Image: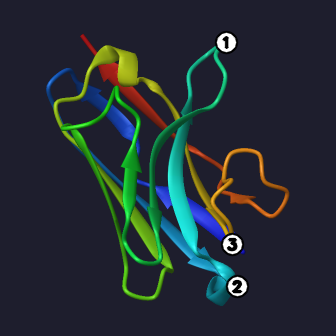
Amino acid sequence: VQLVESGGGLVQAGGSLRLSCAASGSIFSINYMGWYRQAPEKQRELVATITRASSTNYADSVKGRFTISRGNAMNTVYLQMNSLKPEDTAVYYCAAAPGPNLLTGSLTSWGQGTRVTVSS
């Protein structure tokens, strides 16, 4: 599975951005997709995940501000980010896998990342 993210950029605090991730290849094998982020000198962390059944999970830090959604064929996943804060600044990565262990699973595919910078 190949993943390509888009939609990052520079935005002022309080603003919005929408990230997109397009999957290609063996998309039939994907049951879980998600967004993770990594700020400088920090570990990669969960932002949000979504399943083929459209069940969602969010990090506490983004609940109520971010919304994850997906395309019908599990070949696209989106992250709508509202009320952005400077602490949301990071490189955002798209992930996809057959199983739920996206972050450390051996079958997880990762995108190249898209940078989000939120200025105060």
Q: What amino acid does circle 2 point to?
A: Gly
Q: Where is residue 114 drawn, in percent x and y?
A: 52, 44
- The residue at the point 85 percent across, 57 percent down is 106
Near-viewer residue (96 or 31): 31
- The residue at the point 47 percent across, 77 percent down is 52
Say whether disc 3 or disc 1 marks the residue closer to the N-terminus.
1
Taking 24 as reference, is 118 above or below it? above
Q: Is residue 39 left or right of residue 81?
A: right
Q: Quadrant of the N terminus?
A: bottom right
The residue that disc 3 covers is 98
Query: What is the crowding at mark 1: few (fewer than 14 residues within 10 Å), some, or many (at least 20)?
Result: few
Of labels 3 and 2, the one closer to you: 3
The residue that disc 1 covers is 41
The residue that disc 2 covers is 25
Look at the numbered disc 2 and give the secondary structure of its residue. loop
Residue lying furthest right: 106
Taking 55 as reference, is 118 above or below it? above
